[in-house]
Image (tube, rainbow, N blue to C red):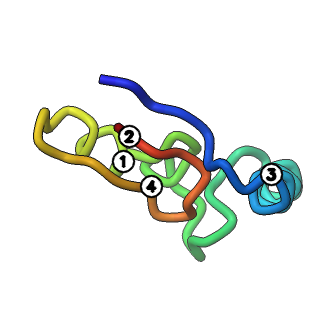
C-alpha cells in the first residue's frame, strides 16, 4: 500500500491552507467531528481495502 499526496501542488497547498483554518478538519466537510479530522475515517477505511485505488474525499491523498 502506498499513500501519497496529490500531484497537483496548487491543490495540495489550497487544501493544507483549509486544514489550517479548520484546525485539521477536512475543509470539504461541514461537520467538525473526529471522523472528519485529516486523514479522515472514510479514507482510512478505504485504504484498509487492498483493492481500493483512488483519492480521499478532498483529494489531498491518493492510494496506489
Q: How many marks?
A: 4
Choose the circle earlier in sequence order: 3 or 2. Answer: 3
Q: Are marks 1 and 4 in contact (CB under 8 Å)?
A: yes
**SS class, disc 2:** strand
Badge 3: residue crowd in 10 Å (few <14, some 14–19, many ≥20): few
Between marks 1 and 4, how big is the CA–CA gap?
5 Å
Residue beneath disc 4: 56
Badge 1: residue crowd in 10 Å (few <14, some 14–19, many ≥20): many
Q: Nearer the viewer, mark 4 or mark 2?
A: 2
Residue beneath disc 1: 43
Q: Outermost residue, top direction? A: 1
Badge 4: residue crowd in 10 Å (few <14, some 14–19, many ≥20): some
Q: Nearer the viewer, mark 1 or mark 2?
A: 2
Residue 59, x across and y down, in percent: 55, 60
Q: Residue at x 80, y 49 (%)?
A: 16
Residue 57's tag is: none
Q: Are marks 1 and 2 in contact (CB under 8 Å)?
A: yes
Residue 50, x across and y down, in percent: 13, 33
Residue 51, x across and y down, in percent: 11, 42
Between marks 3 and 1, how big is the CA–CA gap?
20 Å
* Residue 19 position (above or below residue 64): below
Residue beneath disc 3: 9
Q: Is residue 18 left or right of residue 40?
A: right
Residue beneath disc 2: 63
Q: Nearer the viewer, mark 4 or mark 3?
A: 3
Badge 2: residue crowd in 10 Å (few <14, some 14–19, many ≥20): some
Choose the circle earlier in sequence order: 4 or 2. Answer: 4
Q: Is residue 56 left or right of residue 37?
A: left
Choose the circle earlier in sequence order: 1 or 4. Answer: 1
Q: Are marks 3 and 2 in contact (CB under 8 Å)?
A: no
Q: Is residue 45 left or right of residue 27?
A: left
Q: Quadrant of residue 2?
A: top left
Amino acid at each position: 500500500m502506498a499513500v501519497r499526496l496529490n500531484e497537483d501542488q496548487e491543490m495540495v497547498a489550497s487544501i493544507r491552507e483549509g486544514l489550517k483554518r479548520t484546525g485539521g478538519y477536512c475543509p470539504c466537510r461541514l461537520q467538525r467531528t473526529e471522523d472528519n479530522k485529516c486523514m479522515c475515517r472514510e479514507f482510512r477505511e478505504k485504504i484498509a481495502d487492498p483493492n481500493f485505488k483512488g483519492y480521499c474525499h478532498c483529494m489531498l491523498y491518493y492510494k496506489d
